[in-house]
Image (cartoon, rainbow, N blue to C red):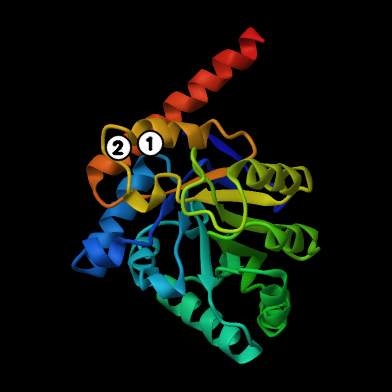
Amino acid sequence: MEYLAYGDTGLEISRLCYGAGRLKDTCDSYEAGSKLMLKALEEGVTFWDTAEGYGTQPHLGEAIRQIDREEVVIQTKTPAKDYDGASASITKALRELRTDYIDVMLLHAVSSPEDLVMREGALDAFREAKAAGKIRVIGCSTHVYTGPVMDAVIDHPEIEVILTTANKEGRMLEGGSIDRHLEYIQRAYNAGKGISIMKVVVAGNISETDMPEWIAWGFNLETAHAINLGMTDDRHITLDAGLARASARQRLIQRKAA
């Protein structure tokens, strides 16, 4: 598995990120979800992404209970916009994840510069939690949105991580073209932000036959530190981990040949 620095955050992550958004839909218990997380860890996937709204923090918590906390980097999100809501979300995340700290806490689905301004209360809660050692890194998800929101989050000095949509055809992206969006991602990368990409396989709306090609596109995007993929069974974990390794080997060969 390929490991790298998550921008300038000081965190080291696996390039393949376990997107846990669908565990609640595909696993009939927290234990079943935790088994998938632990299977991924065996494959070298040390970066796990969840969110309060997914309802899957407890699945990760059950897995975290069984390992050394330092083995994984946990990224979660809150839709809260005010201080009280975000503070409650942080407390809930710590409890459900069975941890004393969250590695990366994101504002979830920031859609515009105005929306980011409206989250200032939530950011106050993030700042307080970071000072108390409850979270390590502050960031945001722009979900499917691009355009001016990308300028706003890139220019914000306290946003250290950006989770954003990117795939080979720009599907699901709202507010601009994929070419322009990739320029934003490049600028964020150059600024030292940690960059994760999502919707790489259009939320699963790609045929099984075409999926490896779409996933490979994500791993070939050098400005993405992490490729966030939803894995719902052992077979998908093995496939995605294999593609991650193959991409790393191919890029290493290309660099040596250059």
Residue 55 or 172: which is nearer the viewer? Answer: 172
Mark 1: secondary structure? helix
Q: Does residue 196 appear anywhere in the picture?
A: yes
Identity of the residue drawn at 44% across and 28% down = 245
Q: Residue 12, percent across and down?
A: 60, 46
Q: Does residue 98 appear anywhere in the picture?
A: no
**What residue type is disc 1 on?**
Ala
Identity of the residue drawn at 79% across and 48% down = 191
Q: Residue 183, percent across and down?
A: 70, 42
Mark 1 crowd level (few <14, some 14–19, many ≥20, 10 Å Cα): many
Q: Residue 25, percent across and down?
A: 25, 65
Identity of the residue drawn at 71% across and 51% down = 193
Q: Is residue 179 above or below residue 146?
A: above
**What residue type is disc 2 on?**
Thr
Q: Residue 258, percent across and down?
A: 67, 10
Task: Give the residue furthest to the front.
Answer: 176
- Asked if disc 1 and disc 2 are in contact, CB closer than 8 Å, the reply is yes
* In-image side of 144 versus 22 (left or right): right
Real-space Cα separation, disc 1 to disc 2, in angstroms: 5 Å
Q: Which residue is mark 1?
A: 241
Q: Which residue is mark 2?
A: 238
Task: Give the residue furthest to the left.
Answer: 28
